[in-house]
Each structure stands twice: as C-alpha cells, then as structure tokens.
Amino acid sequence: MFRLEARCTRNIARHATAPTAKAAVPSRRPSAKPPPNLTILAQRHGGTFPEEYVTNVLRFGPGFSAHGSSEMPVWGPLFQYLENYNEAAVRQRIKNLCDYLESIQEK
C-alpha cells in the first residue's frame, strides 16, 4: 500500500513540477513569467525548506505571496474531490507532495 501511495505521489509531483523542470508540457495560458523553480524553495527561504508555506500554497493557492506564477496547481480542491472530502486523506496527500518537493531541493 505504501509503495502505491509513494508512486502516486511521485506521479502527482511530476505533474506539479513538470513546467518547472522545463518539460514539454503545454501551459494552461501564456505567461510572461517562467514557472517557479520548485527545487530552490529552501534556498529562497534561508536554507530551510518552508514546509508550512508549501503546504498552504498546495492547499489554498499562492494568493498574494511571492511564490511566483499561479501556474502551480492548487491541489487542495482536487484532493478533496478525489478523496470524497475525507480531510485526513487530503492532508496526507498534501503532506506526501510536500515531502516530495522537500526531497528534490538543491543542496
């Protein structure tokens, strides 16, 4: 079960980070700004991965933050739908995605 969840998390994360990795993924709309580089979040936050910040961005969107482009998907509503509004499952999915983003940080 854990392997399946980990594999699903990596696949979801790949979709979330694909534009950042300069993959050939079409954008939803043209943007003058390049997508944010999600591998340097820790660098941009004083060397420490900003877990709470990333969790909030994944769940609620970037709002008025300096995160960058809103091309980064807001996963909270999608996970709520997929998990039939099971809040514990939604939190776990967001935590798994956040853990993955932390694991790809440049050193």
Image (cartoon, rainbow, N blue to C red):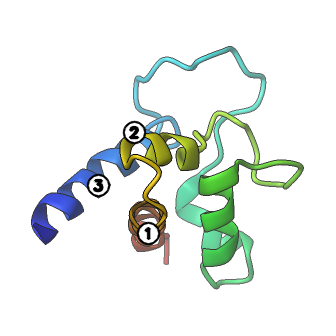
Q: Tell me if residue 61 comes above or below residue 3 in the rendering.
A: above
Query: How many marks do you count on the picture?
Result: 3
Q: In the image shown, does 50 or 52 lie closer to the viewer?
A: 52
Q: Amino acid at mark 1?
A: Ala
Percent from the top left, x then y, of residue 71? Answer: 64, 33
Percent from the top left, x then y, of residue 3? Answer: 11, 66
Q: Amino acid at mark 3?
A: Arg
Q: Tell me if residue 17 comes above or below residue 57 in the rendering.
A: above
Q: Amino acid at mark 2?
A: His
Q: In the image shown, does 17 or 88 lie closer to the viewer?
A: 88
Give left or right: position of 62 versus 95. right
In this rendering, does residue 50 appear at all? no
Percent from the top left, x then y, of residue 79? Answer: 45, 47
Query: Looking at the image, is mark 3 or mark 1 earlier in the sequence?
Result: 3
Q: Which residue is mark 2?
A: 15
Q: Residue at x 45, y 70 (%)?
A: 95
SS of the residue at dot 1? Answer: helix
Q: Which residue is mark 1?
A: 88
Q: Which residue is mark 3?
A: 10
Using the numbered discs, state the Cα–Cα distance from disc 3 to disc 1 in whole angstroms: 19 Å
